[in-house]
Amino acid sequence: MPITEIKSAQTFNDTIKGDKLVVVDFFATWCGPCRMIAPKFHDLANEFPDAVFLKVDVDEVPDVASQCGISAMPTFHLYKRGEKVAEVVGADAKALREAVEANAK
């Protein structure tokens, strides 16, 4: 499943309201831990094709980062029907996998 890079708050808000699980990676290009976990995020996107995977560059779309209260990168939010159901702060691949598995049902 491809990962969509969000470029606007409108696209972000429309996407998280869908019926599918939405997994969002809030990252920055200058963030070393973000680069380290990116391949794991890509693997999860392939492993869970029924979920929607998004990337939000906090420097390119600061209004989305602000709306979501992002203060550290990477931060991962999981949404169902517009409601945040889980959050993982930091490059913790195990915690991210567990959050996706728990909410993909």
Image (cartoon, rainbow, N blue to C red):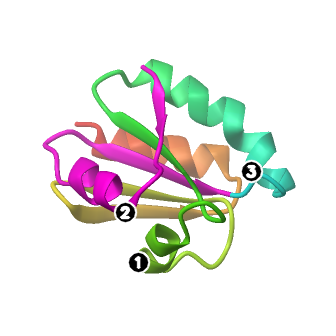
- Mark 2, residues whose alpha carbon is within 10 Å: few (<14), some, or many (≥20)? some
User: Mark 2 belongs to which amino acid?
Assistant: Ala
Span of residues in magenta: 1-27
Q: Identify the element where label 3 is drawn.
A: helix
Quarter of the figure with the C terminus: top left
Any magenta on residue 12?
A: yes
Q: Tag 2, which secondary structure? A: helix
Q: Quadrant of residue 38?
A: top right
Q: Is residue 27 left or right of residue 80?
A: right
Give yes or no for residue 80 being in the magenta stretch: no
Q: Name the residue at 45% across, 43% down.
A: 54
Please give the label number shown on residue 67: 1
Q: Which residue is mark 2?
A: 9
27 relative position to 76: left or right = right
Real-space Cα separation, disc 3 to disc 2, in angstroms: 21 Å
The answer to whether the residue labelled 2 contacts the one labelled 1, judged by CB atoms less than 8 Å apart, is yes
* Inter-mark Cα distance, 1 to 3: 20 Å
Measuring from the top left, give residue 80's x and y in whole percent. 21, 53
Q: Is residue 61 above or below residue 94?
A: below
Q: Is 35 or 5 nearer to us in this picture? A: 5
First reached walking from the N terminus: tag 2 or tag 1 = 2
Distance, label 2 to label 1, CA atoms, is 9 Å
Image spot of residue 87 (x, y percent): 46, 64
| Residue labelled with disc 3 | 34
Circle 3 crowding by C-alpha within 10 Å: few under 14, some 14–19, many from 20:
many
